[in-house]
């Protein structure tokens, strides 16, 4: 990779401005455009000479003969690492993001869906949320009465993971029915995972059907039937906002890149790759273009952050996938702040 210290201040300023314009427009940037927008007295000829030097250094290239220049993957990486002016979220923006992700009365799956959707809407990219399989032992399960046909099931694991899920019933239930269902479950959960409890409860209900109220059986079946991120058979990998990726397509080669990206996002292998990228990371990670070990697709970028809880335990990751010309200065703090919200949730 080129060393930025080998490039003089004038060349750095021209390079930075060119990348800013490219990110904003998606079009190759010419010397005349830079001469008009930089606010300094440099002629187009002088700027062309500097751009030629930057091209020789591997930071720019011309997609077409006699066209303007756009940054290479290497150039974008240097821009992000050394020249990017990071934006900051206002207090209002932070409040809006936090309040758009209510957790009361929602399952963890619903919360993760909301996070991915929110990131997609804020960044105009595809929002990603991923959590490794959780196969924790259970500590407590309880049904809480909400309404005649509505209840909350609270699941607490031995390592402190808590999930609340709403269940709906076709018949009216009472607090006493829910208490009976809770007592039945808590006799079974000691040192067992949710998957194991689901299997045992099914057998237990058959064996104890004569002793259990029919409504209790319905509550148990409803409560344990809903898929959950505490269920080891359920992959928590969510992508939302794929359509946003198409809105940035301007050339035929970009359309092919997006087609490849869509195919990659559908593969299960992507889950392990995502986690491998961030499992030892400290803060937001940025992967750009064909050197990106995640997708290996030129023209695409990933901005992703691990979500950690005390003890340096990773509970998942959140991020976005988009074209390489995404607005890094805004997206990086958005991803970072969202990751911190997820950590507070858990």
Image (tube, rainbow, N blue to C red):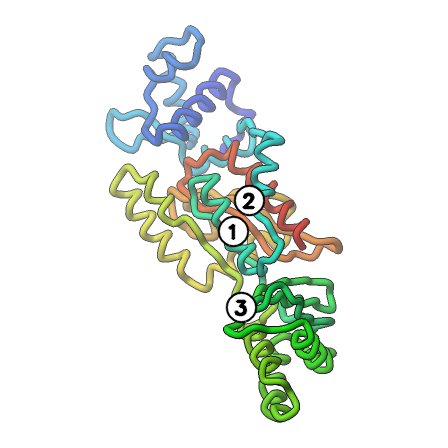
Circles 2 and 1: CB distance less than 8 Å? yes
Asked if residue 62 can be seen in this view, the reply is: yes
Residue toward you, 3 or 182: 182
Q: CA distance from mark 3 to mark 1?
A: 21 Å
Q: Quickly name the residue at label 1.
A: 114
Badge 3 marks a residue whose secondary structure is: strand
Q: Earlier in the sequence, mark 3 or mark 1?
A: 1
* Percent position of residue 32, x then y: 32, 15
Circles 3 and 2: CB distance less than 8 Å? no
Residue drawn at (63%, 46%) of the image: 341
Q: Quickly name the residue at label 2.
A: 100
Image quarter of residue 202: bottom right
* Percent position of residue 262, x then y: 36, 54
Residue toward you, 191 or 296: 191
- Neighbours of disc 2 within 10 Å: few (<14), some (14-19), many (20+): few
Tell me the tag on residue 168. Answer: 3
């Amino acid at each position: 990779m080129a060393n930025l210290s080998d490039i003089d201040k004038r060349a750095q300023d021209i390079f930075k401005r060119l990348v800013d314009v490219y990110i904003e427009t998606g079009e190759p940037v010419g010397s005349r455009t830079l001469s008009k927008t930089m606010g300094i007295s440099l002629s187009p000829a002088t700027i062309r000479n500097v751009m030629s030097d930057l091209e020789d250094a591997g930071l720019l290239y011309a997609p077409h003969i006699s066209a303007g220049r756009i940054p290479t993957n290497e150039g974008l990486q240097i821009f992000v690492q050394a020249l990017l002016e990071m934006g900051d979220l206002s207090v209002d923006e932070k409040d809006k993001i936090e309040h758009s992700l209510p957790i009361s009365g929602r399952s963890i799956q619903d919360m993760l869906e909301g996070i991915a959707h929110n990131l997609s809407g804020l960044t105009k990219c595809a929002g990603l949320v991923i959590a490794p399989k959780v196969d924790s032992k259970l500590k407590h399960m309880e049904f809480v009465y909400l309404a005649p046909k509505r209840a909350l099931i609270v699941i607490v694991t031995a390592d402190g993971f808590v999930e609340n899920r709403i269940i709906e019933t076709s018949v009216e239930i009472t607090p006493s029915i829910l208490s009976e269902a809770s007592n039945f479950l808590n006799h079974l959960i000691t040192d067992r995972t949710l998957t194991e409890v689901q299997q045992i409860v099914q057998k237990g209900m058959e064996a104890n059907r004569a002793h259990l109220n029919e409504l209790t059986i319905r509550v148990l079946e409803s409560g344990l039937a809903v898929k959950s991120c505490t269920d080891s058979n359920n992959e928590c990998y969510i992508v939302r906002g794929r359509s946003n990726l198409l809105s940035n397509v301007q050339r035929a080669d970009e359309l092919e890149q997006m087609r490849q990206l869509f195919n990659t996002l559908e593969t299960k292998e992507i889950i392990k790759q995502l986690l491998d990228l961030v499992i030892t990371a400290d803060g937001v990670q940025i992967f750009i273009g064909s050197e990106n070990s995640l997708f290996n697709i030129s023209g695409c970028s990933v901005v992703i952050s691990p979500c950690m809880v005390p003890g340096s335990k990773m509970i998942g990751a959140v991020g976005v996938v988009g074209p390489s010309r995404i607005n890094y200065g805004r997206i990086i703090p958005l991803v970072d702040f969202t990751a911190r919200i997820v950590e507070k949730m858990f």
